Image (spheres, rainbow, N blue to C red):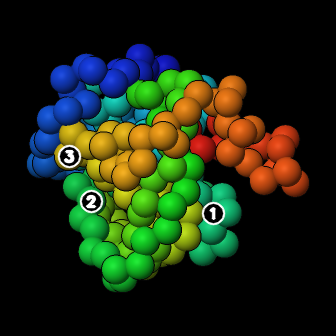
């Protein structure tokens, strides 16, 4: 396994549509997924999409430890998303390709996603809450979309070190930054 270099906002690989993977079970996809997981943990991220490591393919990894139904690592190839509600909620997001910043992003609250695992197993999940946010953030990477473009109020695009000004007093210590970087 290897730790891969993460592309940062401005690199063209982050702005284009990633290609479908012809054979999700190919050994090179398995290797890519293993390297992406290692890179994600090294960078203390919550998720990583292949374009973020300069590979323009529709592959994503993420972790959702707060979801009791799916508490482990998910690796998904050629994912698709169906929104199950019009309801939107705002939450703070960060991104390993936009280091040092946070933004308040509106996201749908409930969705279904499908795809294939690197082992060839079908994935079909209906999720909500933070899991749904992570999925939307990561799948956006496959379509060349970074979270600042989803924001409706750029006054909430702020540096990590200034996040405290946006927190309720009881949250003043803030959640750790690595918890929300994707
Ligand atoms: Ni990201």
Check if mark 1's residue and mark 2's residue have beta carbons within 8 Å. no
The residue depicted at 22 percent of the width and 55 percent of the height is 78
Separation of marks 1 and 2 at Cα, in angstroms: 19 Å
Q: Earlier in the sequence, mark 2 or mark 3?
A: 2
The residue depicted at 21 percent of the width and 40 percent of the height is 144
Give residue 79's mark: 2
Q: How dense is the environment of label 3, judged by Cα within 10 Å: few (below 14), some, or many (20 and up)?
A: some
Q: Where 104 sits versus 32, above or below?
A: below
Q: Where 90 sits versus 124, above or below?
A: above
Mark 3 highlights which residue? 143
Q: Earlier in the sequence, mark 1 or mark 3?
A: 1
The residue depicted at 36 percent of the width and 82 percent of the height is 85
Query: Regarding mark 2 in the picture, which secondary structure is present there?
Result: strand
Mark 1 highlights which residue? 71
- Relative depth, front residue between 161 and 10: 161
Q: Where 108 sits versus 134, above or below?
A: below
Q: Is mark 1 within 8 Å of ligand 1?
A: no
Mark nearest the camera among 2 and 3 is 3
Query: Regarding mark 3 in the picture, which secondary structure is present there?
Result: loop
Would residue 26 be seen by someone viewing this image from the given angle?
A: no
Left or right, 25 with respect to 8, comes to left
Query: Regarding mark 1 in the picture, which secondary structure is present there?
Result: loop
Would residue 81 be seen by someone viewing this image from the given angle?
A: yes
Check if mark 1's residue and mark 3's residue have beta carbons within 8 Å. no
Residue 102, image x, y percentages: 54, 37
């Amino acid at each position: 396994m290897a730790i891969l270099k993460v592309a940062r906002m401005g690199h063209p690989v982050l702005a284009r549509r990633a290609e479908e993977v012809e054979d999700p079970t190919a050994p090179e996809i398995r290797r890519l997924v293993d390297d992406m997981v290692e890179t994600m943990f090294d960078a203390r991220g919550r998720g990583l999409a292949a374009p973020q490591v300069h590979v323009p393919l529709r592959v994503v990894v993420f972790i959702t430890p707060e979801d009791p139904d799916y508490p482990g690592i998910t690796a998904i190839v050629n994912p698709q998303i169906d929104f199950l509600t019009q309801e939107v909620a705002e939450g703070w997001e960060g991104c390993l390709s936009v280091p040092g910043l946070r933004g308040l992003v509106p996201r749908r609250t409930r969705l279904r996603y499908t795809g294939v695992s690197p082992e060839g197993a079908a994935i079909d999940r209906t999720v909500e809450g933070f899991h749904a946010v992570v999925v939307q953030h990561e799948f956006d990477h496959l379509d060349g979309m970074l979270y600042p473009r989803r924001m409706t109020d750029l006054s909430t695009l702020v540096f990590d070190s200034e996040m405290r000004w946006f927190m309720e007093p009881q949250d003043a210590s803030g959640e750790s930054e690595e918890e929300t970087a994707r």
